[in-house]
Image (tube, grey):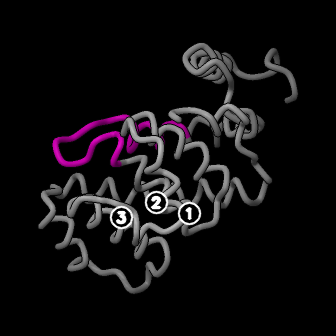
Amino acid sequence: MSTAEQLPADITERIDEVREKSGFVPNVFTSLAERPGLFRAFFEFHDLVMDKDTPALSKADRELIVVATSAVNSCTYCVVAHGAVLRIRDKDPEIADLVAVDPGKAPLDERRRAIVNYSVRLARTPELIGPGDADTLRDAGLTEDDIWDVVAIVGFFALSNRLAHAFDMRPNPEFFTMGR
C-alpha cells in the first residue's frame, strides 16, 4: 500500500485528522499504515495510555515517561517526536533534552523524579523490578491505575522503540522545532 487510496477508510481518516491538527503526518503513521491491523492495535493502545489526564499523572507526565524510556532504548524517533510534545505540554523548551541526555540530572520535582527513576529502571532492568518497587510511585501520590499506566507506557514504548529501530523510522523535521 503506497497510496492513501489503497488504505482502509478508518486509517485514512486517522491520518487526515493528524495532518489537519499538526500540519504534517508523523512518519510512524505512514510506516504503520502498511500493516492496517497493527496500525489499529498500536494506536488504540497508544490512545488508551497516552490520551488521558489523571490527578497524579498528566499528559505531560506521560510524555516525560516516553522520553525517558525512549532515551534508555536509544530511540531517536520517539525521543525527538515525544520530546516535542513534552516541550509543548510542559511549556518548557529544555525539559525533553535534559531528560533524554541524563534523566538523573534533569531538574525534576520529587514526584516526577520518582516517575522517571521507576520508568528508567523498568526499561533498563525489568527483571529486577517487583511489585514493591512501585511504592516510590505510591509515595509520590500515584494511584494503582496510574502505576498501571506508567508500566504500560514503558512497555508500549519498548515495542514502539523497537519498531522504529527495525524499520529505520526517522523523526519528521517539524518535530525538531516544535515547542522551542
- Please identify, in this view, whether the residue under mark 3 or under mark 2 is nearer the observer: 2
Label 2 CA crowd tier, 10 Å (few <14, some 14–19, many 20+): many
Tell me residue 9's x, y (percent): 67, 16
Decide whether residue 45 is among the magenta residues: yes
Q: In the depicted view, which residue is nearer to us: 157 or 78?
A: 78
Give the residues drawn in magenta, as a range: 43-61
Q: Is residue 95 left or right of residue 160?
A: left
Dot 1 amino acid type: Ala
Q: Is residue 135 left or right of residue 104?
A: left
The residue singled out by tag 3 in the image is: 116
The residue singled out by tag 2 in the image is: 99
Q: Quadrant of the N terminus?
A: top right
Dot 2 amino acid type: Val
Task: State the image quarter where residue 176 is shown.
Answer: top right
- Inter-mark Cα distance, 3 to 1: 11 Å
- Inter-mark Cα distance, 2 to 1: 8 Å
Q: Please, what secondary structure does the residue beneath circle 2 have?
A: helix
Circles 3 and 2 in contact, beta carbons < 8 Å: yes
Q: Please, what secondary structure does the residue beneath circle 3 have?
A: helix
Q: Which mark is residue 71?
A: 1
Q: In the depicted view, which residue is nearer to us: 169 or 5?
A: 169
Task: State the image quarter where residue 73 is shown.
Answer: bottom right
Q: In the depicted view, which residue is nearer to us: 48 or 154?
A: 154
